[in-house]
Amino acid sequence: MKRQIKVTINGVGYSHEVEPRLLLVHYIRDVVGLTGTHIGCDTSQCGACTILLNGMAIKCCTMLAVQADGAEILTIEGVAKDGHLHPIQEGFWEKHGLQCGYCTPGMILAAYQLLQRSPNPSEAEIRHNLEGNLCRCTGYHNIVKSIQYAAQKMAGR
Amino acid sequence: MTTATRLFGSAIKRREDPRFITGKGTYVDDVKLPGTTHAVFVRSPHAHARIKSVNTAKAKSAPGIVAVFTGQDVQTGPLPCAWLLPGIKIPPRPVLAQGKVRYVGEPVAIVIAESAYAAKDAAELVDVQYEPLPAVVDCQKAHAKSASQLFDDVPENQSFDWSIGDKAKTDDAFKAAAVVVKQRLVNQRLITNAIEPRACAASYAPATGDLTLWVTSQNPHVARLLIAAFVLGMPEHKMRVIAPDVGGGFGSKIPVYNEEVAVCWASKALGRPVKWTAERRESFLTDAHGRDHLTEAEMAFDRSGKILGFRVATHANLGAYLSTMGSLVPSYLYGPLLSGVYTIPAIFCRVWGVLTNTAPTDALRGAGRPEATYMIERLMDLAARTLNMDPVELRKKNFIPADKFPYQTPVAFVYDSGNYGPALDKALEMVGYRKMREEQEKARKNGQYLGIGLSTYIEACGPAPSSVAGALGAQAGLWESALLRVHPTGMVTVFTGSHSHGQGHETTFAQLVADDLGIPMEQVEVVHGDTGSVPFGMGTYGSRSAAVGGSAIYTSLQKIKEKGRKIAAHLLEAAEGDLLYEGGKWSVKGSPDRAKAFGEVALMAYLAHNLPQGMEPGLEVTSFYDPVNFTFPFGTHIAVVEVDPETGHVKILRYVAVDDVGKVINPMIVDGMVHGGITHGVGQALWEWGAYDDQGQLLSATMMDYALPKADQLPSYETARTVTPSPVNPIGVKGAGETGTIASTPAIANAVLDALAPFGVTHIDLPLTPSRIWQAVKAAKK
């Protein structure tokens, strides 16, 4: 039996009838059609599907769409505003924080929450906070540098 | 142009990044085809079993079902192995299992429905009855008369028995040796884990007979050739393969896989698009795995520490079937690397390729070269300890001297260029080697166990030339193509046959072209990954893109300029020999005002109003560049670790990498690949292990159980370079995609074992997990 859900994604309201078992990530990718959120592992280890749900970074491969009813969601497509890259996106570009780009949306959203909570994180803090996001290309070296760049930029330094 | 302003060599930000950082990349699973159906595979839960029956009746009546096909329906050619060694046995590998299953995860049926959820439900209803058979997992145990056989006509499960080098000369070297170090080494099975799972979508157009396949491939043209000509038996020109944005490959997206053939076949059968995306568990079970060698290695030295000989016997686990390059990796990508960076007068290497009830193995970042390097560098450290020499001193003593290049090794390779001392010295200086040894001494007195590990490695990139590869068994050429299309406006589109799945070709190749033509990078576009637009290509493997793909582009550039010069000379009424090409224009020597810009010449090539007599209009060139030799990057990596003998925990304190990859087009991109490469090798040294139990069940089949490196386990790396250009290609580049992985596994292993030296621990097999370290320390204390 399908259920009606309403969500706001990147400031836009959506309303759909969905199967109760539909995963939130499939809802975002296949029903709404925002394919920037990726699926890497299905079991919430890799973090490629990280989004912000009501301000919290979550892995939407292990959440049902019906559980997100009424939620405010931010995906990678909504991070840049008015055609301007967010400083975290800028950091990833400037510091070569990505190679194949597949883990990148999740990394950026994980970093987004980290910098909200801790605007001036140490390298150790950044690394600790990325523990739930896997990257096979960069060795994390330049991802750390990208987030440091963003922190500086956001602090106006 | 001055060096400072050249695009070649500049750390230019990547032009592919804006789409990736805004979520606008297009990976295969993002491709939405109208009317598509979704496939799910029914897979074997057994490592080895006879299929007694497959009942699809219930599944065929499930809601939303479109079709169910089994091995009886899908009658195609077997999946090919593309490298034939002498006497090799290549048992047929069916697209869907035929009569028997030989590894857990082998596809038995394809279930197609209107949605992926419906297909998954229906797949549950396929009833397969099996008669389990004894499984073989360990490749040494499988290589025995008494072992259970995967194929009736492959006795002892031996696919090949391959060797390289001079056995008699090597045996003599050992007779004359003052010191012999021997070690049995396990190079454990790894699972690649590109973060994007494999995926494919096929769309057959019954009206025209055209088939299009979107697939996560490192080599779309090779996939097309093999699938069309050898498996499906359809005209190659009626098939188009697109590998759009691909989320990492590391070797696992080279082979042709069952699933991509099955969706093609099914799309033809149904006349509708069929799409499949792997779940991570399927990636673990069915992506080609890597490594898995059991080796007896021994090295002979004279009293002064000079190497006299090297003898290696390896059992290589091929898995249940030969993957596309499954036979190449443990033979020609392994044995010829055994001279390392050292003068070794005699080498002999024998490899038995053995079939087991495990997932097929193929290339995994480094592919054969890490296996060889780990062994050499472990033996060098064991020898240093036996000879009571510093590992640095022993390495320096045996380095191939800089004046000996090109250097002929006893195992086929001729090294193009090298200068090993400066890279080692630079790394020693960066890490502060002497001071670090003193710190280590001090720390030991305080009960702290620091270890310093070296790896002085060689890598072989850009496999070549095609004629030699052919003589050695390759069923393909190893060249690369480049089509350069200069548009009438002077804009340039580069169609390259190599493929980018993280390497940044769109930026690097644009730099190469803009630099050579003296035009802005914005005027250059790079296209790859589509057989519909790129003439042909071998794709990306073996760190070949710059050395082979880049050289093909360079060759086309010279031909474009040659034609352009003729047009410019004609328009300027000057002799060709009197023209200079600089800053994007041809000018007459001595009178710089008499000039024609690149764009003007391009326009005239298409207007064709005033061309030299007999010249064809247009300005585009396709070149096929066949390399004359491999390139041989090298370098020194040094790891500093602290090991807690009470818990077995390893902490990486510092990691220094000095690499020589020849000339560098974009240093930012090369550094990035080095970082990622190091991390991959650290993963093998400390955590990663594709572990099967004795029944052939994969124990590490999720990211919870297979330990991929994480950000908080790693330090920031300290990297530097020396530059020894390659003389074998016109742009002097070597290759940088795999150096880190090749170098870092032995550097970390040597560091950990150096830390444990006070306990008398000489060797622990990979991965060096806390429990293994703890056990080794405990056993040594007894």
Image (cartoon, coloured by chain):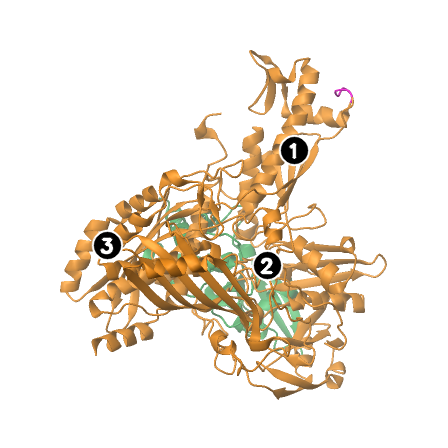
Chain colours: A green, B orange
Quadrant (top left/top right/bottom left/bottom right) for the C terminus of chain B:
bottom left
Q: Which residue is mark 3?
A: B390
Left or right for B722, reference B590: left
Q: Which residue is mark 2?
A: B254
Kindly report which numbered mark, 1 or 3, lies closer to the viewer in this rendering. Answer: 3
Mark 1 is surrounded, within 10 Å at the Cα level, by few (under 14), some (14 to 19) or many (20 or more) other residues, namely some
The chain carrying label 2 is B
What residue is shown at x 31% (from left), y 63% (from top)? B181
Q: Amino acid at mark 1?
A: Met
Q: Amino acid at mark 3?
A: Asp
Q: Distance between the Cα atoms at labels 1 and 2?
A: 32 Å
Mark 2 is surrounded, within 10 Å at the Cα level, by few (under 14), some (14 to 19) or many (20 or more) other residues, namely many
Residue toward you, B429 or A116: B429
Ranked by sequence position, the earlier of labels 1 and 2 is 2
Q: Which residue is mark 1?
A: B491
Q: Check residue B523 in the rendering and tell me which mark sits there, or answer none.
A: none
Residue B626 location (% of width, % of height)? 61, 43
Mark 3 is surrounded, within 10 Å at the Cα level, by few (under 14), some (14 to 19) or many (20 or more) other residues, namely few
Verify whether residue B127 appears in magenta: no
What residue is shown at x 46% (from left), y 37% (from top)? B10
Kindly report which numbered mark, 2 or 3, lies closer to the viewer in this rendering. Answer: 3
The chain carrying label 3 is B
Q: Distance between the Cα atoms at labels 1 and 3?
A: 57 Å
> Which span of residues is magenta-colored?
B609-613
Verify whether residue B610 appears in magenta: yes
Tell if the residue under mark 1 belongs to the same chain as the one under mark 3: yes
Cβ–Cβ under 8 Å for marks 1 and 3? no
